């Protein structure tokens, strides 16, 4: 029997298109503090970082305690938008569900998550998309240092017993690729997220996908080379 390998996915910008939710919640969080909101492009550039770290990037002149309260205001705003029905479902990117179903159906592949989202946010995403049963390890921003620290990937490896050489991370930001590299795991970038393909390659991505249909062949190339 072939030993299993592990594919770890980022969430926002990789599996789901949540930019409308993120931008609206960020605008509301800054407005609650009487602060000018960052541009949409600036907001999307920090997707993947844990919230207090993201707020420190977006509001570098603010005090650390303000970064914490901005993060909490963002969480509350995101939840309020959802509760009031003012935000629509953040859709899966085209081909994501088919790719996940195909990989999870293989005996030689396990699936994991490494995301800056909270446990609450992941529970909601799993409920809305029916994805929870596909993943054997799920790491969130509530339990680890912010990306690109390798703690999330290392925990995925520890929980599955899979060595770094037999794992790959799939993500849309340089934080994802750098996190994988720090844990000794290869990274595959996706071209439909929040950082450019050039930036992903510079960060160490083996390649950048144009669509999910290209993922199986990219995995074969990574592991074939290994």
Image: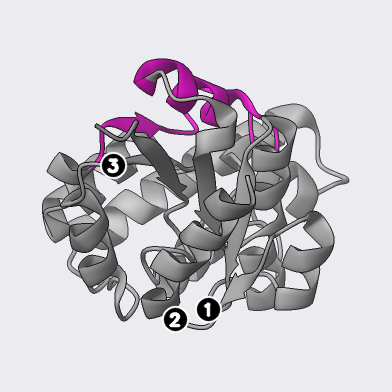
Q: Which of 206 and 194 is in front in this view?
A: 206
User: Which mark, by number, is residue 192?
Assistant: 1
**Residue 57 appears in the rendering:** yes
Instruction: Judge depth for marks 3 and 1 and give the one in front.
Output: 3
Residue ID at (65%, 29%): 150
Pointer 3: what residue?
108
* N-term-proximal mark, 3 vs 2: 3
The answer to the question of whether label 2 and label 1 lie on touching residues, with beta carbons closer than 8 A, is yes
Q: In which quarter of the image is residue 83?
A: bottom left
Residue 72 x, y percent position in the rendering: 49, 37
**How many numbered discs?**
3
Q: In this rendering, would 46 be left or right of 101?
A: right
Say what secondary structure mark 2 lies in.
Answer: loop
Q: Is residue 4 left or right of residue 1?
A: right
- Residue range in magenta is 135-160
Where is residue 2 drawn, in percent x and y? 31, 35
At x 42% / y 54%, what residue is drawn?
11
How much space separates mark 3 and mark 1, taking CA atoms? 27 Å
């Amino acid at each position: 029997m072939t030993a299993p390998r592990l594919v770890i996915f980022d969430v926002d910008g990789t599996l789901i298109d949540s930019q409308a939710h993120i931008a609206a919640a960020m605008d509301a969080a800054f407005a609650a503090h009487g602060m000018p909101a960052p541009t949409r492009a600036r907001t999307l550039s920090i997707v993947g970082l844990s919230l207090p770290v993201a707020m420190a990037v977006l509001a570098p002149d603010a005090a650390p305690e303000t970064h914490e309260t901005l993060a909490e205001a963002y969480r509350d705003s995101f939840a309020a938008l959802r509760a009031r029905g003012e935000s629509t479902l953040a859709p899966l990117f085209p081909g994501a569900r088919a790719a996940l179903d195909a990989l999870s159906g293989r005996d030689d592949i396990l699936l994991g998550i490494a995301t800056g989202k909270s446990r609450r946010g992941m529970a909601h995403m799993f409920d809305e998309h029916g994805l929870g049963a596909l993943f054997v390890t799920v790491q969130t921003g509530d339990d680890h240092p912010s990306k690109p620290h390798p703690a999330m990937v290392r925990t995925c490896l520890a929980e599955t017993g899979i060595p770094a050489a037999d794992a790959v991370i799939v993500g849309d930001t340089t934080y994802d690729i750098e996190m994988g590299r720090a844990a000794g795991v290869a990274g595959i970038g996706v071209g439909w997220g929040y950082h450019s393909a050039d930036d992903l390659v510079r960060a160490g991505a083996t390649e950048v996908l144009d669509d999910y249909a290209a993922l199986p062949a990219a995995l074969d190339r990574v592991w074939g080379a290994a």
